[in-house]
Image: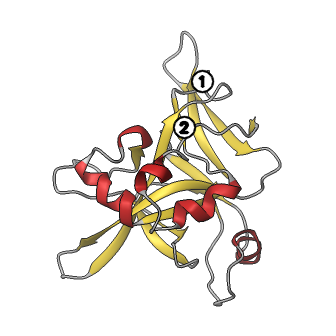
Amino acid sequence: MCGRYGLTASYKELKERYDLEDDGYSFEESEEIFPTTENIVLLPNQRLHPVKWGFEPSFAKRPLINARSESVLEKKTFKEPFAKKRCIVPATYFFEWQPIEGQKKKDKKKIAVKDVPIFSMAGICERYTDDNGDNYLTYAILTTEANDQMRPIHDRMPVILNPEDEKQYLDLDADPKDVQTLLKPTSIELTIE
């Protein structure tokens, strides 16, 4: 599960991290990003674009903010977006809530990737049409089973791509089954506060 994350990096830092051409794009850094808000993602054309967080299929009672990586090629809602509309969701950390033994409340944990100031979460996009007939883009973050560090906190975590796999992930000509093999729990050390 990934229900909130932060992106506290400047456009210049993102430009250097993803080797982007300077298109004068600007955005506001955010210490806590919530579902249904518009946030930047990196599209396969190597451009940052503001996209709304949460798929909105007609059957869903609330936006679908996550998709399970293990079944992304089997679920009708996610199969085509994974094959043809992948994106990278830049982040500096994400949040997860750890149950406190014997209590109803949970402890909010801030989780980052050690020595990686900006990391890439695997995402997929989908286009919808609003009541006025205007198209808009949405995204969902892919999740996987928790690694050893995350397991005490939650049984799921976002797919954090290895930097060397990012280009293949965004390559829409790549076989989706090959791309799916990249969707595994990260082996990079996390920092948890």
Q: Is residue 128 left or right of residue 131?
A: right
Label 1, label 2: how far apart the Cα atoms are? 9 Å
Q: Which residue is mark 2?
A: 157
State whether residue 132 is above or below residue 86.
Answer: below
Toward the viewer: 31 or 10? 10
**Kind of element beneath mark 1:** loop
Assess whether mark 2 and mark 1 are in contact (beta carbons under 8 angstroms).
no
Specify few, some or many for label 2: CA neighbours under 10 Å numbering under 14, 14-19, or 20 or more.
many
Amino acid at the residue labelled 1: Arg
Position of residue 9 measured from the top left corner of the image (x, y, whole percent): 72, 66
Relative depth, front residue between 24 and 34 = 24
The residue closer to the viewer here, 99 or 116, is 116
Q: Is residue 75 above or below residue 30?
A: above
In this rendering, the answer to whether 182 lies above or below 47 is above
**Residue 92 visible in the shown view:** no
Location of mark 1 (residue): 151
The amino acid type found where label 2 is placed reads Met
Q: Position of residue 74 (x, y in %)?
A: 28, 44
Disc 1 packing (10 Å; few <14; some 14–19; many ≥20)? few
The residue lying at 69 percent from left, 71 percent from top is 18
The residue nearer to you, when weighing 112 against 61, is 112
Residue 131 x %, y %: 17, 76
3 relative to 132, above or below: above
Q: Quadrant of residue 83?
A: bottom left
Quadrant in which the C terminus appears: top right
Image spot of residue 117 (x, y percent): 77, 56
* Quadrant of the image occupied by residue 127: bottom left
Helix, strand or loop at disc 2?
A: strand
Which numbered disc, 1 or 2, marks the residue that appears first in the sequence?
Answer: 1
